[in-house]
Image (spheres, rainbow, N blue to C red):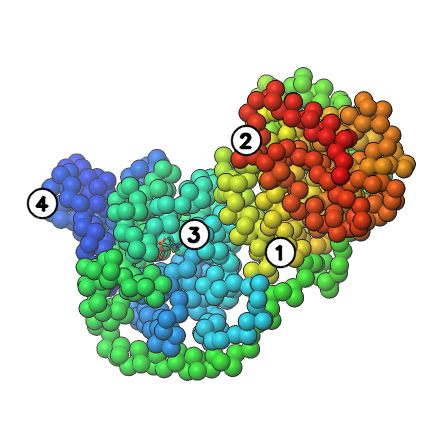
Amino acid sequence: MASGSKTAIDPQSANAFGASADAERIFDAFRQWGYLEADLDPLGFLRPSPRPELQLRGRAAEEARRVYCATIGAEFMHLEDTGRRRWIQERLEGPQTEVDQDHVLDQLMRADLFEQVLQQRYLGNKRFSLEGVTALIPLVDEIIEAAGEYGAVELVMGMSHRGRLNVIVHVARRVPEEVFAGFEDVDPRSVLGSGDVKYHMGATGEYETRTGHKVHIHLVSNPSHLEAVDPVTVGRTRAKQDRAGADGTRQYLPLLVHGDAAFAGQGILAETLNLADLPGYSVGGTVHVIVNNLLGFTTLYSEEQSSRFAAQISRRQDIPIFHVNAEDVDAVIRVGRLALDYRYTFGSDVVIDMIGYRRHGHSEVDDPTITQPLIYKAIKDHPPLWEIYAEDTGIADAQARADAVRAEFEAAQSRAKSVRKKPSLRQLPGYWDTFKGGRYRAQYDVETGLSANEIQAITARLTSYPEDFHIHPKVKKLLEQRSEMGEGKRPLDYGMAEALAFASLVKAGVPVRLSGQDSRRGTFNQRHSVLIDTENEHEYMPLQHVTESQARCEIYNSSLSEAGVLGFEYGYSRDYPEALVLWEAQFGDFANVAQAVIDQFISAGEDKWGLLSGLVLLLPHGYEGQGPEHSSARVERFLQLAARDNFQICQPSNAAQYFHLLRRQGLRHWRKPLVVFTPKSMLRHPDASSPVGNFSLPHFLNVLPDAEVRDPERILLCTGKIGHELRTERKKRKDTSTAIVFVEQLYPFPEAELVAELERHDGARDIVWVQEEPANMGALFYVLPRLRRIAGKRGVLSVKRSASATPATGSSKAHDVEQKTLLALAFSTKA
Ligand SMILES: Cc1ncc(C[n+]2csc(CCOP(=O)(O)OP(=O)(O)O)c2C)c(N)n1
Ligand SMILES: [Mg+2]
């Protein structure tokens, strides 16, 4: 079906009729509806849908039909901007660019024969063949070719399983031996408990275009969870662009390759699309390619989506969709060029929906004739794409060329056994020290205190704004209070502690980026990072005016998404390791909507792929009578994921500790994700505020010892808010025999500090873990065995709410009763 350069549209087509209003009307009808009658499925199962609007005759109709109902179906009349619509129509109706058919044939052969050699040599192995949609390889080649001409230096590519091995060889240009080696037997001891399967691993490589441009290829590591890699890829791109400066969006091009079922079905894709034009998240346009085989595993397209095309989820946005028949490879190439030009002209996302088929079962090992017997009957006798293309283009020596390509792959395959295995990822350290160019240094701890003078100087900047700025009276008061805090006249609360941490970090050259829902003001009215002029809504961000030479500080209100935004920030943190990157949940439990990002990337990325991230998650947590959904950040889930130093899990119980924790994360050259359970009611509570002197202490303390009680008979161990309530209760009871110790870092478990604290109080008989959460939640299951191990002969008891199906009661009165009982039990429980 290859059309070759012969099908170039007559440049006079539309213009010849330009004078006639009728002709224009006819063309408009085809521009609007033509894609529905287009010939898009090579096997013909997805039939054109005849439109009454297009039952038109005459030369204009014939010409318009040739443009809009052939093998490209362009959906673009929904675009709001007339200029963009006209741009697309002129490109489609005007002269078509030449295609280097010789080059295309070569790529199709390579793509198909690579799969066939894998099939023959490793029968019964999963590889997720590209056959049926091998036009992806020349399509991506054309995209890179065009990107190189625009000055792109890197293609940041996210994709799932289908065709990934083919892409690693033909796009990332790794030698095929490397991929073949992945199919050879390996010593299981070298990968046990870490690493990942071959069709998920990331890859990098160099691509030299035919016009001599060098484009680095970065294929992002990908979990099985379909589309989860989308926001990660876009976030990584944004970080690279931010580093590059003004030219970033030109230099770094994101390309996402999707399956049709996943594109239609997975919400995280929709969340990612929605980030496209938001200031904190835009990347100057992402190119999306749907590798559409009209199947998802065993499921037919008509069961996948409530629309004709999988691509139609993207119709909600102002972006064009180009459906294209995967067997008209020249049309595919033209669509690739058109999409790239569109991205670079308008800084917009663009979707290519390339429709082909899947030659084998989903993963080659299952038999598709059981579920789609008719489709597979048609596929059985359908020749590979390179043969069709060779015939259509009349390239004579195709078979001989194919034999040579096959021999090349077979030779590579026979060399595969001797390819040296990569060392296990297990040995990779968590340190990160590339930006100073030095050797790895274990800098786990760094001094985080600031002198009183430094605090005062920063406070002055944080609390001032331009003279003509009309400040809101409530914000004015808050800044006045912060000013007093910085001068040591009143204790510092969390909001001030955080502002001081951020300001001091950017002053020291560490960029800060925070995003989350309503994060600029702060869900609990605690942050006020951006001042808004009451007269004109002009903005002033004191954190951007700390010093002349400071690093950037960015705080964004995110879209109402968790998975999409958290994935984005994880990606960002990957490519901006010298920055402190934070994501904030509105309430901690909303992070569960992003569970795949937490499970598949944040907690597992280092183990699977050897990739480091210093991302911080801020998760408001605490039992305050607000009901089942606003109480718990699900501490237990994070603790269950913790192993092999994969991340840090902390609950700083006062403002100064929060300050030191953020600075520790930003300053040390050791990149590990940090999960912080942050307070709500304690944000401004005097008990959790800290005197200014505590900000000059040298370090974050993993354990806060009890300084008040000398020889306790009982030690209460806890984290966060409940500890302050226990202290109040102790005062009320005039109790002098109970020590209250805060475990500020739950993971890695601060065993040495806790042992020291228990030894210091060796007269205490009872050691009690106290938590607000029910028995089946919170840190209980995690701390109890660890405490028992270090408590020796002394008993370890626990006080908690009864096991429950929900984190907390919906009744605030019941909450109060429960809380009182907890406190009473904490002081009375005996072994
Ligand atoms: C979130 C998620 N759910 C389910 C699966 C299991 N799964 C793997 S591939 C696949 C079908 C994907 O179809 P499509 O997106 O069209 O890609 P194709 O394999 O057809 O290229 C499914 C259901 C998965 N990997 N991720
Ligand atoms: Mg599919």
Report the front residue among 392 and 147: 392
| Relative to 393, residue 162 above or below | above
Chain-order first, disc 4 or disc 1? 4
- Element type where label 1 sits in the image: loop
Q: Which residue is mark 3?
A: 226
Q: Is residue 233 visible?
A: yes
Q: Position of residue 509 (x, y in %)?
A: 72, 46
| Relative to 354, residue 826 above or below | above
| Relative to 800, residue 437 above or below | below
Q: Which residue is mark 2?
A: 629
Mark 4 → mark 2, Cα distance in angstroms? 64 Å
Residue in the picture at 60% in, 39% down: 777
Q: Which residue is mark 1?
A: 612
Give the number of the mark in front: 3 or 2: 2
Residue flagged by tag 2: what amino acid is it? Glu
Say if disc 3 is inside 8 Å of ligand 1.
yes
Residue flagged by tag 4: what amino acid is it? Gly
Mark 4 → mark 3, Cα distance in angstroms? 47 Å
Give the number of the mark in front: 4 or 2: 2
Report the front residue among 285 and 790: 790
**Quadrant assignment, res 389:** bottom left
Mark 1 → mark 3, Cα distance in angstroms? 22 Å
**Quadrant assignment, res 766:** top right
